[in-house]
Amino acid sequence: MFTERVYNFSAGPSMLPLPVLEQAAAEMTNYRGTGMSVAEMSHRSKMYLEIFETMKTDLRRVMRIPDEYEILFMHGGATGQFAAIPMNLMPLTGKADYAVTGNFSKIASQEAKKYGEVNIAASSEDKDHTYIPQQDALRLAPDASYFYYCANNTIYGTEWHYVPATGAVPLVCDMSSNIMSRPVDISKFGIVYAGVQKNMAPAGVAVVIVRKDLLGHEMPITPRIFSYKTTAEKDSMLNTPPCYTLYMLGLVVKWVEEQGGLEAMEQLRTERAGMLYDFLDESRLFHACAEKSARSGMNVTFRTGDEEKDAAFVKAATEKGFLNLKGHRLVGGMRASIYNAMPVEGVRKLVDFMKDYECNNR
């Protein structure tokens, strides 16, 4: 058992900023003189609607979301969007392009096949998802309803460092694990979405940013709860939303802005990731898994090359307060998830521990 906070390198649900947790704790039983917790409030009450509208306004400002985009808060997390996206957009032409560069984009493409024709426009499966296909490798269909990709791959530790050019075909991007870690030009996309549990809030909602001209094309079979048009018309309150998660999202957005916004988040992610990759490139015990050109700034995957040594390292790290470094069950090895809330000090201390561990375990 630990008597102090640990460094939590979980891929999600992930650590939250300490000031956010402290504010939430202070407001838990009596939010600003209401005599109740936000978790107990009616989503139709004046106080909660103020929380909701402030959060939504702050998110639009911090992410620089243009007015021609709706911001939706939907049930089912990112996995729910694997079905919602084709149900809402596939009717445009009956087909869609998918880039398969990891486990979640593969699942998304398989889900989409239930609703229309799916063209695998790119895949990195030939090299176990250790790289990202470049623009000239994309096999684009000019009549696709949309082009889908996952910006950051938590399991394999790769990240798209460019925005695909698809002409008039709308871009749909899963940004679950790198949203708000750097500035993004939302106007390049038809839809940007994210499950919040990695970089924005506790688990419980998907943020869906959708261009307004893409509303209203859903299939007749689309459940109302998954209809973008209906969700927009009801301001994400078709039914009871995950009220407390959205309150926490608002606190995180304010924290990001107080730190200097997305530019500051990008500087911090560069510092954290650079520190860890620099050590891995020099290490004689550990090595990074992803190709250099595709390395993720959020999820650093690495290993020793020996499963027993990997397990011994994870055990030793856990005992020192560096938790959740075990890699995903599909790939093994280790993974350090270094989202916005991870302090630079946490990565520095991890690297120092890894250096000492290497000296004593060659």
Image (cartoon, helix red, strand yellow):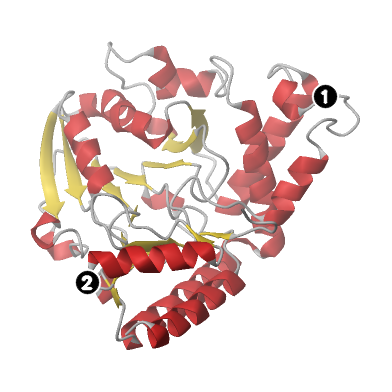
Image x and y of residue 106, in percent: 20, 43
Q: Nearer the viewer, residue 244 or 239?
A: 244
For the C terminus, which image quadrant? bottom left
Task: Please tell me in which quadrant of the rendered image residue 43 appears.
Answer: top right
Image x and y of residue 118, in percent: 12, 35
Q: What residue is shown at x 56% (from left), y 76% (from top)? A: 349
Can you say whether 230 is above or below 336 in the image?
above
Q: Nearer the viewer, residue 46 or 10?
A: 10
Q: What residue is shown at x 24% (from left), y 46% (from top)? A: 103
Task: Give me the C-alpha separation between circle 1 and circle 2.
Answer: 53 Å
Q: Residue furthest right?
A: 33
Q: What residue is shown at x 31% (from left), y 31% (from top)? A: 85
In the image, what residue type sits under mark 2? Gly
Q: Secondary structure at mark 2?
A: loop
Characterize the local packing of mark 2: few (<14), some (14-19) or many (20 or more) Cα atoms within 10 angstroms: few
Q: Secondary structure at mark 1?
A: loop
In the image, what residue type sits under mark 1? Met
Query: Which of the two discs, 1 and 2, labels the residue nearer the N terminus?
Result: 1
Residue pointed to by mark 2? 305
Residue pointed to by mark 1? 36
| 301 to the left or right of 75 | left
